[in-house]
Image (cartoon, helix red, strand yellow):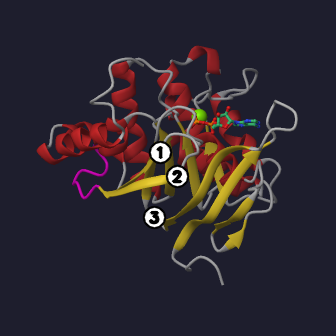
Amino acid sequence: MAGSSAAALSLENVARRFPSKARGSALFTAVEALSFEVRSGEFVALVGPSGCGKSTILNLVAGLDRPSEGVVHVSGEPVRGPNTHVGFMLQKDLLLPWRSIRRNVEFGLEARPIGRGERTARVERELRRCRLTELADRYPHQLSGGQRQRAALARTLAIEPDLVLLDEPFSALDAQTKLLLHRSFARTIVASGVTTLLITHDLSEAVTMADRILVMSERPGRIVEEIEVGLPHRDDPIARASLPRARELMAHLFHSLHLDDRVDA
Ligand code: ADP
Ligand code: MG
């Protein structure tokens, strides 16, 4: 019996190796010896340097890829392929340009056995939660980058996933939009109560948004540290950012990732 019942997500001794480009050489290990859990309702951030295997993990959890070793459970069930338990969103919003925002939010529900009334209710609820009701009849090109990411989140939440995976969803935005979107996402996530795994290389984002942070090493990615954030203002990252403990945690993470003794990128 793998994975405790309270865990929305568990990885046990997971590795993912890819064939090397050079013929006959050893396999290329993207991640290995990865074990961690995310409890139901928890917001966990996974941070690590570029190329350490963060997106590889997202693909394994979303069922878009299979581990070479180990096992991934979502909601107590082994992940065998893409499934309705997991919703994910990426840096690129993937909104369909020919559909209105409302019809984009509805998109994921169309293949589900959900009646019309229920479908409409869910769409309107998520539009409201993401503060998009007034923009619902617009098309993606008529929205700002931040508004589009809110629409992508609304679409992800409309399927009522047990777990939401966010792969660097703020990284293409300018600094100010990013801060406002952190707050917007935090409020929506707290209001929905959904379990969240945020993948990011942005340390302050991790500290101001998450309940717990898992720090990964450089490739092959492993978890090298776990931090309980323990800060108030779960729904207000901007308020969190100014707390002394938040600053301490950021400095600590900076040190953990050896960013303080590096000169060049
Ligand atoms: P991150 O998201 O942390 O930046 P990735 O998970 O995208 O890192 O990639 C981790 C490593 O695995 C990188 O070196 C990448 O080139 C390699 N990798 C990812 N996917 C594949 C694949 N399908 N085939 C071969 N190598 C891959
Ligand atoms: Mg990535």
Q: To which residue does mark 3 refer? A: 41
First in residue order: circle 2 vs circle 3: 3
> Magenta region: which residues?
229-236
Sort mark 1 into few (<14), some (14-19) or many (20+) by Cα contacts within 10 Å. some
Q: To which residue does mark 2 refer? A: 222
Asked whether residue 152 appears in the rendered view, the answer is yes
Residue 195, position in %: x, y?
50, 59
Residue 127, position in %: x, y?
54, 40
**From the viewer's perspective, is the residue at label 3 or at label 1 nearer?**
1
Q: Is residue 182 left or right of residue 18?
A: left
What amino acid type is highlighted by mark number 3? Answer: Gly
* Dot 2 beta carbon under 8 Å from ligand 1: no
Sort mark 2 into few (<14), some (14-19) or many (20+) by Cα contacts within 10 Å. many
Sort mark 3 into few (<14), some (14-19) or many (20+) by Cα contacts within 10 Å. some
What amino acid type is highlighted by mark number 2? Answer: Arg
Real-space Cα separation, disc 2 to disc 3, in angstroms: 24 Å
Check if mark 2's residue and mark 1's residue have beta carbons within 8 Å.
yes
Q: Looking at the image, which residue is at 83% across and 50% down? A: 111
Q: Is residue 116 left or right of residue 184?
A: right
Please tell me whether residue 176 is drawn above or below residue 260 in the rendered image. Answer: above
Check if mark 2's residue and mark 3's residue have beta carbons within 8 Å.
no
Q: Indicate the secondary structure of the residue bearing disc 1.
A: loop
